[in-house]
Amino acid sequence: MDVRVVHCDDYKFRVTTWGSGAPHAILLPGLSADARALAPQIRALRPLVGSVHVIDLPGFAIRPALMVKDARFANLARMVGRVADELGVEKATFLGHSLGGGVALHLALERPDLVEGLVLLAPAALGRSLHWIYKLYCLPLIGRALLRPQGKGSLPFLRHFLVGSQRASDDHFLAMLLRHNSNSRDRALSARSIVWANQPSLWRKILLFLSPGGEQLAFAIGDRVKSLADVPTLVLWGNQDRVICASDARRCADHPRAEIHVAKGIGHMLPLEAPAWANGHIRRFVGELQRRPVGVPRAQPAFADAA
């Protein structure tokens, strides 16, 4: 394992790498998360590719924290692309969870030359809505209080908000998730900057409080998903995701090179909640990606629920 710091603009990105050489896989964790949140996927990918790189956004691992002016999805994607260039990566499979999935989608739109394939785990930026509490995050005073550095969280919060019914009673698993939490001030500030930089315009925000939905309008890629028709894409979701609704996956249903799978009883922490299920799909997808001749699509897109 090699850990390095890559400078981009005024920020420092921590990059953790296993292996060397092509083919490359680049992993992007979710909001306020790090490599531990994708540990099962790292282990699954290592035998399949030459290098596995985990890129931590500024403030999530190394100071300084992100500033609001730099924290829009498109700019995060641009910076991740520049970090990949600094690593000498010419093409990679990008795996992203939640926020990381949204950044990967924006990167695929802006830098198709860099993206060999996409693995999206409950990604942001596909649909319209997020959990209702996101509306409160966008209010300056309330959002500042809710997104401040805090302690390790609580079991009830994890049980009722982040995980699904299959793991909700697994106290050992929940305790592990609590250990992953961070009370880092820089991580909290970076998360807050991302929320505030990507909130809807003022008039849209007012409408949000009058009607349900629309929290992702400012950064969702919408109909631009059609531009990804040439990018092999795997979308995995939990049907009990209370953060980003699994129905957003249907935005990719007409994507000719996408397959979609939804796991029953699984919440937003899909990479850790159902690692065997997720990794089974990831191993097959990445293996096919390495063997498939350029320009040859999958025979048929899939949308399936796991038993």
Image (cartoon, rainbow, N blue to C red):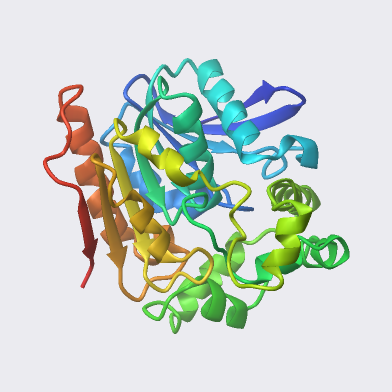
Q: Can you say whether 174 is above or below 64 in the image?
A: below
The spot of residue 188 in percent (x, y) is 75, 54
The spot of residue 47 in percent (x, y) is 27, 36
Residue ID at (40%, 64%): 246
Instruction: Tell me the quarter of the picture where residue 243 sits.
Output: bottom right
Name the one closer to the observer, 89 or 146.
Answer: 146
Residue ID at (71%, 40%): 71
Q: How many marks?
A: 0
Residue ID at (56%, 17%): 86
Name the one closer to the observer, 213 or 285.
Answer: 213
The answer to whether any part of residue 290 appears in the image is yes
On screen, residue 197 versus residue 97, left or right, reads right
Q: Can you say whether 267 is above or below 260 in the image?
A: below
Residue placed furthest toward the left: 299
The answer to whether any part of residue 152 appears in the image is no
Q: Quadrant of the C terminus?
A: bottom left
On screen, residue 137 versus residue 162, left or right, reads right
On screen, residue 217 versus residue 231, left or right, reads right
Instruction: Tell me the quarter of the picture where residue 150 sits.
Output: bottom right
Q: Can you say whether 194 is above or below 291 in the image?
A: below
The spot of residue 67 in percent (x, y) is 79, 39
Residue placed furthest toward the right: 141
The spot of residue 13 in percent (x, y) is 64, 31
Instruction: Tell me the quarter of the picture where residue 229 sits.
Output: top left
Residue ID at (75%, 40%): 66
On screen, residue 24 versus residue 171, left or right, reads left
Q: Can you say whether 190 is above or below 208 in the image?
A: above
